[in-house]
Image (spheres, coloured by chain):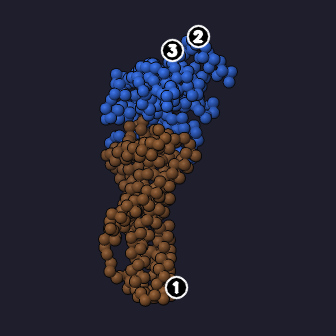
Amino acid sequence: MEKFTFVTRFGSYLLFLATCFKKPDKWRMFWKSFFNEVYKMGNDSFGIVAIISLFIGAVTVIQFGSQLQGSLVPMTILGRIVRDANILEFSPTIVALVMAGKIGSNIASEIGTMKVSEQIDALEIMGVNAASYVALPKILASLFAIPALVVCSMFLSNIGGAISCYFSEMVTVDTYIQGLRMDFNGFFVTHALTKAFFSSFLISTISSYNGYCTEGGALEVGAASTMAVVQSCLAVIFFDYILTQIMLY
Amino acid sequence: MIVLTDISKSFNGRSVLNQISAKFVKGKCSFVIGASGGGKSVLMKCMVGLIEPDSGIIDFDNRDFLRLEYSQKKELRQEIGMLFQGGALFDSLSVEDNVAFPLRMFTNMNKSEMLDRVNFCLNRVKLDNVNKLFPSNISGGMKKRVGIARAIAMNPKYLFCDEPNSGLDPLTSRVIDELITEITEEYNITTIINSHDIKSVFDMGDHIVFIFKGRCLWEGHKSDLKRSNVPELEQFIAASEFK
């Protein structure tokens, strides 16, 4: 039986999703909860995303700049490399990993606490579809909030690169910007947003599921929260690879 | 009236409920008593639909709960109110919003009608000026009272109370007991209370079901409780009185 644990849990995860994606009992309450979640996820996470993105851009400039120094490659390429690296990989993946830690643990512990304090049971007894009521607004809100944060991160990481150019004098800011504007491929943004949508879905559903399955007390809520972050991070990295393989080659 | 027929439930091969049959009458407080771990909570969870029994029939006024369609089950659940051991109030909502929750979810009342109903329910459980407080700001006894107010907000036909006195001082316990009795008689509700508090059983119980290790060993009126001739029940009462 032990070796089927993964299959059993995956089946249970799919059943949880089937229960979640049902018509809400009351649309007015659903929308209220949805907008509240979008605001909470987006607004509360913007600060950390902004700081991380600025530093990622700055570090990327220094890393690539140091590789290019002394070579025959024109330094305008630096802006292009940094832009594409940020759009294609750093922004969607690192923001997703940060969100897995921040939003994922928040969702799992919130729903987990509701479960162990019998609030979920109270909803069920009232005749409310508890899985849908507590998880669906969070899942749909994440599909808006996380891609929006990824878009912000794309801009900010490139700005971080410019700031780094200004201070490091590795390359002038003008040259860097010239590189940023070189050969822009719009499909890269589509690719990044596709990854962001997948990541958002994985983070919110895995975390909701872990929270919803919590049994016991405070220790189990903590364990569910940790499990949600670990599983979300692994799923994000795995699908990052799969989507990159499918979309770019 | 709620009628249970041969309810059995086991977890991982371990039998927790073994062919339990019982009747709970309308307008009366019925008690399910027994030692901790005897299966009282599992039986209650089976009755309210949180756990599906392996076999048996749960009949709510000629409606077989286990065999109802999803939508019918949902309708029936709106006729059920439940008071949880820990209150189970929604942490993120104020007292007012907690009581208003089922009304918002299942009725088309406007704001003022809803507020009137909420205030009526809160007054009924003798709570004033707590509308805007959050569950974290009120005492255990107040949480239980808000739980009762939320449970009666939809005028339920059936009220389930899971150990309503646990963690409360004797005075507050008495207040909660009196509230449950009054509400049961006033609204003619079928009330089922899980408890191991013998004092409450003698004070407010009408019909008693004694469960021991997952089996129903005795069922009857409280006046016959001390003449049961069931050694396990006699022991249970003696231990409670000694305590």
Residue A221 in the image, given as x and y percentages of width and height: 54, 47
Give the numbered dot on residue A168: 1
Image marks 1 and 2: residues in contact by CB distance under 8 Å: no
The amino acid at mark 1 is: Ser
Q: Is residue B130 above or below residue A183?
A: above
Tell me the mark number nearer the camera, choosing from 2 and 3: 2
Image position of A89 (left or right of B139): left
- Which sits in the foreground, B124 or B35? B35
Label 2: how many Cα within 10 Å (few below 14, some 14–19, many 20+):
few
Same subunit, tags 2 and 3: yes
> Which color has been applied to chain A in this rendered view?
brown
Residue A31 visible in the picture? yes
Q: Is residue A73 above or below residue B190?
A: below
Chain coloured blue in the rendered structure: B
Tell me the element at label 1: helix
- Which sits in the foreground, A117 or A100? A100
Residue placed at 55% from the left, 22% from the top?
Answer: B213
The chain letter under disc 3 is: B
Residue position marked by numbered label 3 in the rendering: B220
Give the numbered dot on residue B229: 2
The amino acid at mark 2 is: Asn
Residue A90 in the image, given as x and y percentages of width and height: 44, 70
Label 2, label 3: how far apart the Cα atoms are: 12 Å
Residue placed at 46% from the left, 87% from the top?
Answer: A71
Same subunit, tags 1 and 2: no
Tell me the element at label 3: strand
The chain letter under disc 2 is: B
